[in-house]
Image (spheres, grey):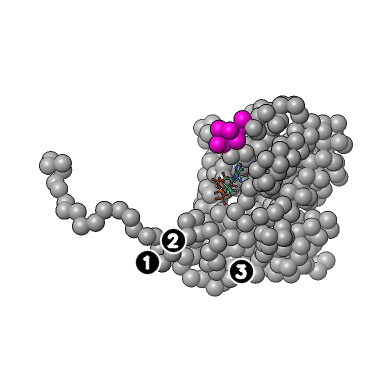
Amino acid sequence: MAEVKVGLQGVVIAQSSICSIDGERGKLMYRGYDIHDLAAHSTFEEVVYLLWHGRLPTRGELEELQKDLAENRLVAPEILEILKKLPPPQHPMETLRTLVSALSLYDPEAEDMSEEANRRKAMRLTAQIGTLVAAFGRVRNGQAPVAPDPQLNHAANFLYMLKGQVPNAEEARCFDVALILHADHSFNASTFAARVTASTLSDLHSAITSAIGTLKGPLHGGANERVMRMLLEIGSVERAEPYVHDLLARKQKVMGFGHRVYHTEDPRATVLRKMSEELGRRTGEPKWFEISRRVEEFMIREKKINANVDFYSASAYYVLGIPVELYTPVFAVSRISGWTAHVLEQYANNKLIRPLAEYTGAANLKYVSVDQR
Ligand code: COA
C-alpha cells in the first residue's frame, strides 16, 4: 500500500505557472513577480490581468480590463431580490455561496465551456462578487444597495458600494493592496476545491461555489473574522498576553497564526503589519494594531509560530470600517481572481483529480436484514 499523506501535506499534484511559494524563505510570487514588488507598485486590476494572462498588461490592455470590470459590476436585479428574501443567515458566506451559485442561472453562457466564454464568465464573476458582498453588507442593515460607480477602480468602488461614501485616496490604496495580497496562493484549500470541481469538467460557477464553501472554514478564510473577534474580546494591550496564554493552556489555536506552507513569516503579513500600523496611526485608532503586535510577540516567543495573512488584515479592515462579519467574504472579493485563473488553467490541461484512500473499515461482513439487527 502506498504511503498515506494525511491532508495531502507535501504532495505535489499538478504543474502550475500561476503562483509559487517558497515556504522556507517566506517568498510568494504571482507569475514570477514578488508579492512585495506587486504590493508596492501594482494595482489589483493589473494583478488580475497578470493572473489570467500570465504577463503584465500593456497600458491599452489594462485600460480595457478596467473598463470591462467596471462595466460588468451590475448584477441581475433578480439576484438582489433573492438577497432581500433570504432568511437572516448564520454566516454571510452562506449568502455569498448561494448568490454566486444563483448568478449562473442568469448567465447566458453558464453552460458554455469554450475558453472565450469561460474568460468572459471569469470577468463577470470577478466584477460582481464585490457588488454582492457590498449589497449584503447594506441590506442586512436595512439600507438600499449602492449602485457601482464605473469611474472608480475596483478597490475604491467596493468601499463606496459598502459605505455609500467614496473613500479617500489612502483608504482606497490600502484596500487595493489588501486585494493584491489575497489574490492568489497556489493550491490552497479553496483553490484546490475549485480545481477538483473543474476537473470533472463542471462549469465555472460550480467551481467557484465549491471554492466559496471551502474558504468559509475557520482553518482557511474564516480565520480573519475570528482574529478580529479575538482582538475585540482582548480589548486592551495589557490583556493580550494573559488572554493568549490562557488560550494556549486550553490547547486552543490562536487564529491568524501558523501555516501549512510557510515555516517563516508569511510575506503578506509583513506588508499587512505595516499597513495596520499606518492606518491605526492615521485614523487615531492605534489600539488594534498594538494589541495585535503584543499577541504576535507572545506567539513568536512562546510558540515560535508566525502570523499569517489573516492576522493583520483583521485590524487593518477594522480601521477601514469594514464590518467584521464581512472579512471572509472580502477575502473572496480578491481571491476570485486566483480561483478563476486556476480554473482556466485546469480546463486548459485537464485531468480528473481523484486521489485514493487507505481503507481501514470492516471487511467481508454478511448483510443482516433490518428486522434481525
Ligand atoms: N495556534 C496555536 N498552535 C498552533 C497554531 C495556532 N494558530 N497553528 C499551529 N499550531 C500548532 C499545532 O497545535 C500543532 O502543534 P502540535 O504539533 O504540538 O500538535 C503544530 O503547530 C502544527 O499545526 P497543525 O495544525 O498540525 O498544522 P497544519 O499545517 O495542519 O495547519 C493551519 C495549518 C493554518 C490550519 C494551522 O496553523 C491553524 O489552524 N491556524 C489557525 C487558523 C488560521 O489562522 N488559518 C488561516 C491560515 S492562512
Give the image location of residue 191, x and y in percent. 57, 57
Which residue is under mark 3?
Answer: 16
The residue tagged 2 is 4
Which residue, as the protein is rendered here, is positioned at the far bottom? 349
Q: Residues within 10 Å of mark 3 (few under 14, many from 20)?
A: few
Disc 1 to disc 2, C-alpha distance: 9 Å
Based on the picture, tell me whether residue 343 belongs to the magenta stretch.
Answer: no
Foreground pick, 357 / 102: 357
Q: State how far apart marks 2 and 3 are (Cα).
A: 24 Å
Q: Residue at x 46, y 67 (%)?
A: 352
Q: Could you say where residue 324 lies in the image, as x and y percent from the top left?
A: 67, 35
Classify the position of the C terminus by image quarter: top left
Residue 170 visible in this rendered orientation of the protein: yes
Secondary element under disc 3, as helix, strand or loop, is loop
- Please, what secondary structure does the residue beneath circle 2 have? loop
Does the closest atom of ligand 1 sit within 8 Å of the Cβ of label 1? no
Q: Is residue 80 left or right of residue 365?
A: right
Q: Earlier in the sequence, mark 2 or mark 3?
A: 2
Q: Residue at x 15, y 48 (%)?
A: 368
User: What count of labels does the image hold?
Assistant: 3
Q: Which residue is mark 1?
A: 1
Q: What residue appears at the point 53 percent right and 49 percent down from the top-left corner? A: 214
Q: What residue do we see at 66% from left, 55% from top?
A: 263
The answer to the question of whether label 1 and label 2 lie on touching residues, with beta carbons closer than 8 A, is yes
Q: What segment is highlighted magenta in the picture?
A: 246-252
- Residue 304 location, x and y as percent? 67, 46
Q: Amino acid at mark 2?
A: Val
